[in-house]
Image (cartoon, rainbow, N blue to C red):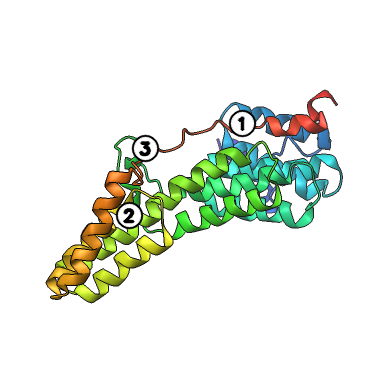
């Protein structure tokens, strides 16, 4: 019994020493000796399978171990998409920006600009919004403005890109929502009795967001604000403008949101990396 006890104690001491040295606690990394091609292939498969966190992890290892070459270059674009799909918008934007700065002449840099726009376009949509329709104009316009600028940059730099047509549609939708947001602010001022502020905000919508559905609401608010301020002539003139535009059919009706695109990962087919 005594010998057995000492035997067990010896094993416990040995195990403790091994653990202290990190031999047993050190995590085994099966990718340690993988080539760049192997890492990229496995990351791509994880991304296609919807395992975005694992895909991002593998892309990070690829960039760290093989910072040069076509696999590392393409992984920087793919990891942006992985972060985006994995609900990490800040990391996705940073990765897309890094790709644009490092490879401004890359044939797929237009995709990076477009992806930035899509990330900002969707980043303010929360969990509830995905299942219950909400008024996008009620949200903070910060991300909408960022998306608009991203899409505008894409259209300016790459007018013939296959992503530009969709970007322009989204810009029009964002413009409508930004105009509606301004109308919501004007309505808030009306409730507060701040009629001059409401009139100024409504006037900005009319001047800055022509040919949007919000112009009708802005004109109505402007008429009400002028009436409350005792500016009967201005109210009458604004009402006449509203009626003339209605009769001429110049007022825009609301438009549905652009359909969500499946960006996928197939942009990397350009380099034929899956054939190596």
Q: Confirm whether residue 88 shows in the render.
A: no
- SS at mark 3? helix
Crowding near the residue tagged with mark 3, few <14, some 14–19, many ≥20 C-alpha atoms within 10 Å: few
Q: Which residue is drawn at 32% across and 54% down?
A: 215
Q: In which quarter of the image is the N terminus?
A: top right
Q: Quadrant of residue 80?
A: top right
Residue at x 81%, y 39% (from the top left corner) = 71
Query: Which residue does the image show at 38% across and 50% down from the upper left?
Result: 212
Q: Horizontal and vertical percent for residue 114?
A: 62, 45
Specify which label sits upstream in the sequence, 3 or 2: 3
Above or below, 203 relative to 177: below
Residue 126 can be seen in this image = yes
Q: Which of marks 3 and 1 is nearer the N terminus?
A: 3
- Residue 210 appears at what percent x and percent y? 41, 55
Whole-angstrom CA distance, mark 3 to mark 1, is: 19 Å
Tell me the mark number nearer the camera, choosing from 1 and 2. 2
Q: Mark 3 points at which residue?
A: 130
Residue 38 image point, x, y percent: 79, 31
- Which one is in front, 58 or 178? 178
Q: Which of 221 and 135 is in front in this view?
A: 221
The residue singled out by tag 2 in the image is 215
Lower sequence index among marks 1 and 2: 2
């Amino acid at each position: 019994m005594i010998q057995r006890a000492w035997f067990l104690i010896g094993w416990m001491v040995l195990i403790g020493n091994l653990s202290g040295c990190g031999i047993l606690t050190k995590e085994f990394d099966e990718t340690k000796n993988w080539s760049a091609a192997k890492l990229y292939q496995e990351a791509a498969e994880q991304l296609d399978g919807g395992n975005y966190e694992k895909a991002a992890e593998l892309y990070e290892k690829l960039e760290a171990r093989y910072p040069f070459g076509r696999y590392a270059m393409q992984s920087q674009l793919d990891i942006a998409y992985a972060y985006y799909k994995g609900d990490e918008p800040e990391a996705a934007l940073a990765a897309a920006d890094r790709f644009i700065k490092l490879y401004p002449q890359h044939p797929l840099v237009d995709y990076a600009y477009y992806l930035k726009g899509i990330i900002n376009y969707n980043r303010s949509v929360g969990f509830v919004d995905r299942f219950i329709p909400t008024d996008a104009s009620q949200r903070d316009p910060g991300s909408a403005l960022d998306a608009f600028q991203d899409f505008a940059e894409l259209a300016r730099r790459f007018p013939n890109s296959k992503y530009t047509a969709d970007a322009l549609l989204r810009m029009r939708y964002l413009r409508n929502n930004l105009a509606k947001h301004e109308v919501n602010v004007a309505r808030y001022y009306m409730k507060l009795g701040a009629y001059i502020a409401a009139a100024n905000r409504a006037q900005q919508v009319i001047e800055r967001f022509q040919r949007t559905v919000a112009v009708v609401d802005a004109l109505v608010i402007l008429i009400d604000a002028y009436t409350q301020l005792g500016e009967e002539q201005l109210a009458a003139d604004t009402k006449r403008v509203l009626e003339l535009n209605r009769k001429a059919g110049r007022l825009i009706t609301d438009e549905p949101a652009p359909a969500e695109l499946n960006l996928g990962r197939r942009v990397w087919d350009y380099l034929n990396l899956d054939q190596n």
